[in-house]
Image (spheres, grey):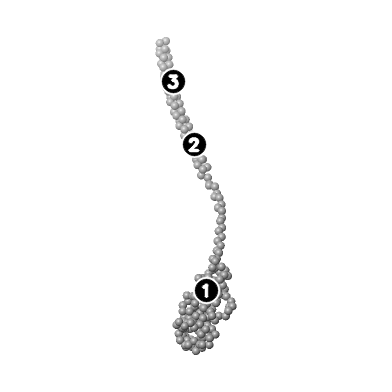
Amino acid sequence: MGANTESDGNGIGLDRYWKRRALALAGVLGAVGLLAWACGGGTGGAGEDERVRDASAVDGAGPPPPPSAMPTVTVTTTTTPGAGQADGGPCDHDELVVNMSAAKNVYAGTERPEFRVTVVSTGEGSCVFDRASLDVRITSGADRIWSSAKCRKEGEPKATLQRGIPYVDEVAWNRRRDCEGNVRARPGTYVATLKGATARKLVFTLR
């Protein structure tokens, strides 16, 4: 009886020892599993939040709305001629360029001195030019010999000038004093000037 009793006592002690060891191991495994679940759950939540933020960023990065059409504005400019440039009106003296020239400067015998007068308008459009305003004057020193304005026929038509197109007037002197005079001019040096214009004076000789 004594031997069996000791044997049974040792067996019960071993059983209790292994039970405590098993419970301790189970507790450790349980703690490790709980920790692993806690870590796995936290990572999954962060991943969901990141995916939600990424989805929001994709939605916000969509193509911008098409620009609205800009209105088209058309500007029309109309140029109105000035008062002195009215089409068909009288020519403005300040817009006329007048010149006088002669083919020769020496006339012998019965040759008549001839002068070429050109008038050019610089104004816009057309204008009416009074030909009677052209006055070629012949002088010898202080002696006034002849004037083309006095010898023109009355009622001569006026000329219409276009911008940049010269009007040409040929003026010839019959070598007589005045218009109807019978006195011929003497041989000598004479000067032709264009009254009211800046054209240069022409000096010529009668022989």
What residue does disc 1 label? 120
Percent x, y of residue 153: 57, 80
Which of the 4 image quadrants contains residue 20? top left
Q: Is residue 190 above or below residue 54?
A: below
Q: Is residue 112 visible?
A: no
What residue does disc 2 label? 49
Which of the 4 image quadrants contains residue 151? bottom right
Q: Is residue 81 visible?
A: yes
Q: Point out the tag, 2 or 1, that comes first from the N-terminus.
A: 2
Mark 2 and mark 1: Cα distance apart in space: 90 Å
Marks 1,3: beta carbons within 8 A: no
Q: Nearer the viewer, residue 162 or 176?
A: 176
Mark identifier at residue 19? 3
Secondary-structure class at tag 1: strand
- Identify residue type, mark 2: Asp
Mark 1, residues whose alpha carbon is within 10 Å: few (<14), some, or many (≥20)?
some
Q: Nearer the viewer, residue 80 or 83?
A: 83
Percent x, y of residue 11: 42, 16
Residue at 46% over, 30% down: 38
Q: Is residue 3 above or below residue 24?
A: above
Residue at 56% over, 62% down: 78
